[in-house]
Image (cartoon, grey):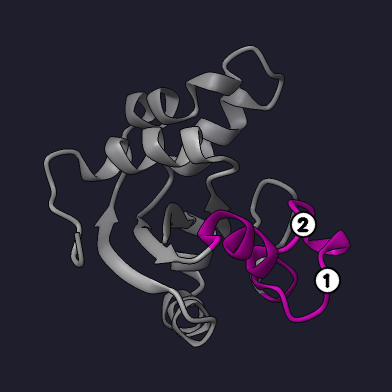
Amino acid sequence: MERTLAIIKPDAVAARHVGAVVERIESAGFEIRAMRLVRLSQADAEGFYAVHRERPFFGSLTAFMSSGPAVVLALEAPDAIRRWRTLMGATDPAKAEPGTIRRDFGASIEHNATHGSDAAETAAFELAYFFAGVTLAGA
């Protein structure tokens, strides 16, 4: 079993897509081990996305991620990282496969409805960022 972090971003929360995204997660066979509604401060978003600090999109990304509530989830399944990234779809919703979350709910590369860890090391950092000190269900 593998764990990964999923975020339902502020655009999808504002558009009231949380239920539909959670339904797709559960229908795809993921176990939700933890889930929280969060409102990131600018500093929280900058800490979470620190790996992108030197990228030109860092400022707009962190401003967007701190613009409203988001839902963070700890997901578990065999091959969870790859499977969640496949279910999300390509970063650019216009290039995402039909039926993926980003294709169906994303509006642009930045406002693309969801986030997912890209590797085991990233997942460990990201899960600890949002669920430090929390015993994940099923652990």
User: Which residue occupies the foreground of this view, 92 or 35?
Assistant: 35
| Quadrant location, the C terminus | bottom left
The answer to whether marks 2 and 1 mark residues whose Cβ atoms lie closer than 8 Å is: yes
Left or right: 46 as drawn, with respect to 113: left
* Coordinates of residue 133 in the picture (x, y in percent): 12, 40
Three-letter residue code for mark 2: Ala
Q: Secondary structure at mark 2?
A: loop
Left or right: 6 as drawn, with respect to 95: left
Q: Secondary structure at mark 1?
A: loop
Q: Is residue 92 above or below residue 62?
A: below
Farthest residue, direction right: 95
Count the marks. Answer: 2
Taking the magenta stretch, the answer to whether it contains residue 36 is: no
Marking on residue 90: 2
- At x 42% / y 30%, what residue is drawn? 48
Q: Is residue 34 above or below residue 134?
A: below
Marking on residue 97: 1
User: How far apart are labels 2 and 1 at the CA level?
Assistant: 7 Å
Q: Which residues are magenta?
A: 79-104
